[in-house]
Structures are given as C-alpha cells and as structure tokens.
Amino acid sequence: MSTQEHDPDIQNVPLFATSPAYFKSVVSTYYDIAFVWDAVANWMVPYQRYTYYPVMGVARFNLYLLSWHHLFSAKSTSLGASNAWWVRPTEIAFMCCYWLLFLYVLLWRCLPSWTVRVAFVVVSHLTTMPLHVQITLSHWGMSTADLGEHESFAQRQLRTTMDVDCPAWLDFIHGGLQFQAVHHLFPRVPRHNLRRLQKLIRGF
C-alpha cells in the first residue's frame, strides 16, 4: 500500500476514482486513513458515469458531515495555537445557529406536515446539484501536485482549477461556480462580476 498526499476533495473511493492511482490502495496523509481498493470499489467504479449525477444530488449532505468532522478534528483544534483561537468556537456557534434555524424554525415551526418537510429537504438539496457538478468539473480533472515556493499564487490557481464555459443566461443556475479559476484568484469579487473579470484573466 503506497503512502502519498492527495487532494482531500477528490478521495471518493469506492464511489468514484478520478485517477488510475486509486486502482491500488493508497494511504491519505491528509485523512490519515487508507483508501482501500477492494471488491466494492472494483464493482462500483466502472459504473461511476451512471452514479455520478445521483450522488451529486445528495452531495450537500456529505458537506454537512465533512464540516462537522473538520471542526472536531486535530487540524481544526490546531488553529487555537495561533492568534485566531476564536475561529473554531465561532464556527461551531454559527453552525449550531444554522441548524437551529433550519431544523426548528423552518422545518418544524413553518412547515405543516412531515410529508411537506421531507419534500422540502429533498427538493432544496436536489436543486443544488448543478453547483456540485460545477465544483467537481472545475477541480477533479486538474493537477493537485505541490510545486513549492517557486510557483506563484496566480500560477497555482490557474493550474489547479478551471472555468467551465456556459452561456450568460445560465450564470444564475451555476451560482458563479463555473468561474472557479477566477474565483480562486479573486475570492472577494462578487459573483455578478466574475464573467467580466474572466476576460482580464484570459488576457493574463
């Protein structure tokens, strides 16, 4: 079993394998666990072209899980060693506020029945599928190698992410995530300006 660093966003064995490197078991130095290529992966990965979109439809639930996992992991607790000791408890507090608003105020207090509640959760999460598709298209096919300090910030962002072309009338559906390289270069630019900014990036 080989040990190597991998982009934590693309480790999806046994559901998906985005590189032949996953055809043999690897130990992730990020998660500190083994991604084992077993009989389940051997059976599921050949069908990933069919399972991709259904999985993207429920991918938001995985993000909830990963958010809590990160906040209670050693990587998150190490933030307290710096001057930003307040970041982790603040994030936990705001995530608790979100779940209070979503589960209690919205689902329990505002919706009349369990049928409506379940339907609301399913529909509201399925409609975010284009965003998850955009994120995976923009990242999974790109390099994850760390070239060190000799590579500039701009070069790294343009090498590790890409934009996905679509007509302007689809911008609202994709939420600006189709301009992923532009967003990585200028994360504070609002999404309604990303298409205009992309022209400058192409020139660069």
Image: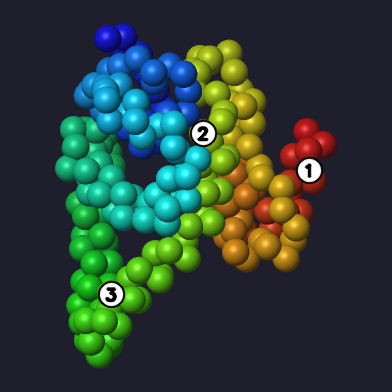
Res 29 seen here: no
Residue for badge 3 = 118
Could you tell me how far apart the alpha carbons at marks 1 and 3 are, in whole angstroms? Answer: 45 Å
In the depicted view, which residue is nearer to us: 125 or 188?
Answer: 125
To which quarter of the image does residue 98 belong? bottom left
Give the structural element (helix, strand or loop) at label 2: loop
Name the residue rendered at 21%, 63% in the picture: 96
Q: In what quadrant of the picture does the C terminus appear?
A: top right
Horizontal side of residue 41 vs 155, given as left or right = left
Q: Quadrant of residue 6?
A: top left
Asked whether 130 or 50 is in front, the reply is: 50
State the image quarter where residue 26 is shown.
top left
The answer to whether residue 156 is left or right of residue 127 is right
Report the residue at 24% width, 38% height from top: 76
Residue 200: assigned label: 1
x and y percent of residue 7 in the render? 41, 27
Please name the amino acid that badge 3 sits on: Val
